[in-house]
């Protein structure tokens, strides 16, 4: 009896969505699927109660069951939204003590760990020249300098592109970032317009010095940028991304290498070696330590891999 009533109420609600709210057939199909699942979950309860008898406790239980089955947080949130809208409509046509879905949230979405290269692959990407290319050509020298600096200092690609050869303030123009060879550091303006200084390693400084000799041979339309295209214009973040991706592919690196991968690699490798989370936070320009703590997970993953490979009692026995 209740099952028939439940399906009838859902049919009325979907009819309202179609005729009154003019929702698309695709959207209505999605609502139907989510509400039919609500009925199926309700049918598992003792006595097969009507939908109007469902409580907060039941909805929380349903959400937990979906999560236990492996449904991701985004899908659970969508179902809860569909159920919440249905109960809002049902409250206008039936007596409900409260909307049982109100205030119930989906499980937190798992944040994917940032991808980082191994130390060997990171060094290959920044140190080796693209096969078949003249390592001493201006474009290759520029690439080498940019890639070394990305990995050396963990810069965002926008920060790298904004670097000037030196600090400039003239008219309405003021440098957002620049390199200081004497102090062996770069000054950059990051998110929230916050400025920070980051050390630059010797390998990056040498690569930049080699690039500057070639840079002086270019026809410079803009004299300020540290990194220029062959046309003498400031290197854009998109061009940097394309160059890095093509370079990594030419080396056979089995990963989609983009500037943020080198930033992640920088953070992960420095943290693995030093264990100094606060220092890594400062160099990355993270406002909160929580944003930097994700790299401790990367570090633990590496330790777990080493343990699994090396510890005699961690190895899986070969099947006989």
Image (tube, rainbow, N blue to C red):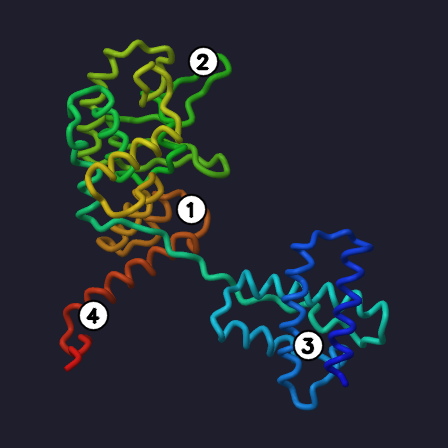
- Between tags 2 and 4, which lies in front? 4
Relative image position of residue 199 (x, y in whole percent): 27, 37
Q: Residue furthest bottom?
A: 47
Q: Which residue is mark 2?
A: 170
Relative image position of residue 317 (x, y in whole percent): 17, 79
Q: Which residue is mark 1?
A: 286
Q: Residues within 10 Å of mark 2 (few under 14, many from 20)?
A: few
In the image, 28: left or right of 192?
A: right
How much space separates mark 1 and mark 4, taking CA atoms?
Answer: 32 Å
Q: Quadrant of the C terminus?
A: bottom left
Residue at 17% x, 28% y: name it.
206
Q: Residues within 10 Å of mark 1 (few under 14, many from 20)?
A: some
How much space separates mark 3 and mark 1, taking CA atoms?
Answer: 39 Å
Q: Residues within 10 Å of mark 4 (few under 14, many from 20)?
A: some
Q: Earlier in the sequence, mark 2 or mark 1?
A: 2
Q: Earlier in the sequence, mark 2 or mark 3?
A: 3
Counting labels gives: 4
In the image, 286: left or right of 21?
A: left
Instruction: Identify which residue, 110 or 21, lies in the foreground.
Output: 21
Which secondary structure lies at badge 3? helix
How much space separates mark 2 and mark 4, taking CA atoms?
Answer: 58 Å
Instruction: Identify which residue, 132 or 227, lies in the foreground.
Output: 132
Q: Which residue is mark 4?
A: 308
Quadrant of the image occupied by residue 32? bottom right
How much space separates mark 4 and mark 3, taking CA atoms?
Answer: 43 Å
How much space separates mark 2 and mark 1, taking CA atoms?
Answer: 30 Å
How much space separates mark 2 and mark 3, taking CA atoms?
Answer: 63 Å
Q: Which residue is mark 3?
A: 56
């Amino acid at each position: 009896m209740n099952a028939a009533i439940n399906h009838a109420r859902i049919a009325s609600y979907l009819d309202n969505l179609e005729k009154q709210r003019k929702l698309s057939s695709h959207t209505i199909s999605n609502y139907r699927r989510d509400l039919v699942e609500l009925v199926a979950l309700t049918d598992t309860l003792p006595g097969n109660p009507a939908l109007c008898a469902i409580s907060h406790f039941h909805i929380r239980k349903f959400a937990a069951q979906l999560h236990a089955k492996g449904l991701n947080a985004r899908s659970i949130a969508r179902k809860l939204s569909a159920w919440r809208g249905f109960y809002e409509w049902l409250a206008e046509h039936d007596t409900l003590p409260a909307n049982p879905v109100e205030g119930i949230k989906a499980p937190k979405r798992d944040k994917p760990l940032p991808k980082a290269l191994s130390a060997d692959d990171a060094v290959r990407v920044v140190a080796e020249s693209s096969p078949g290319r003249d390592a001493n050509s201006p474009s290759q020298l520029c690439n080498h300098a940019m890639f070394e600096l990305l990995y050396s200092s963990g810069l965002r690609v926008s920060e790298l592109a904004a670097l000037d050869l030196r600090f400039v303030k003239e008219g309405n123009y003021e440098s957002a970032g620049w390199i200081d060879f004497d102090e062996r550091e770069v000054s950059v303006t990051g998110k929230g317009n916050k400025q920070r200084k980051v050390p630059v390693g010797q390998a990056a400084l040498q690569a930049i010095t080699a690039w500057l000799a070639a840079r002086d041979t270019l026809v410079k339309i803009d004299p300020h940028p540290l990194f220029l295209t062959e046309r003498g214009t400031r290197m854009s973040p998109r061009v940097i991304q394309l160059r890095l991706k093509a370079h990594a592919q030419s080396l056979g690196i089995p990963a989609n290498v983009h500037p943020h991968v080198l930033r992640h690699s920088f953070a992960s490798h420095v943290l693995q070696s030093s264990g100094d989370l606060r220092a890594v936070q400062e160099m990355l320009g993270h406002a909160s330590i929580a944003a930097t703590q994700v790299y401790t997970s990367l570090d633990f993953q590496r330790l777990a891999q080493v343990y699994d490979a090396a510890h005699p009692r961690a190895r899986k026995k070969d099947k006989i």
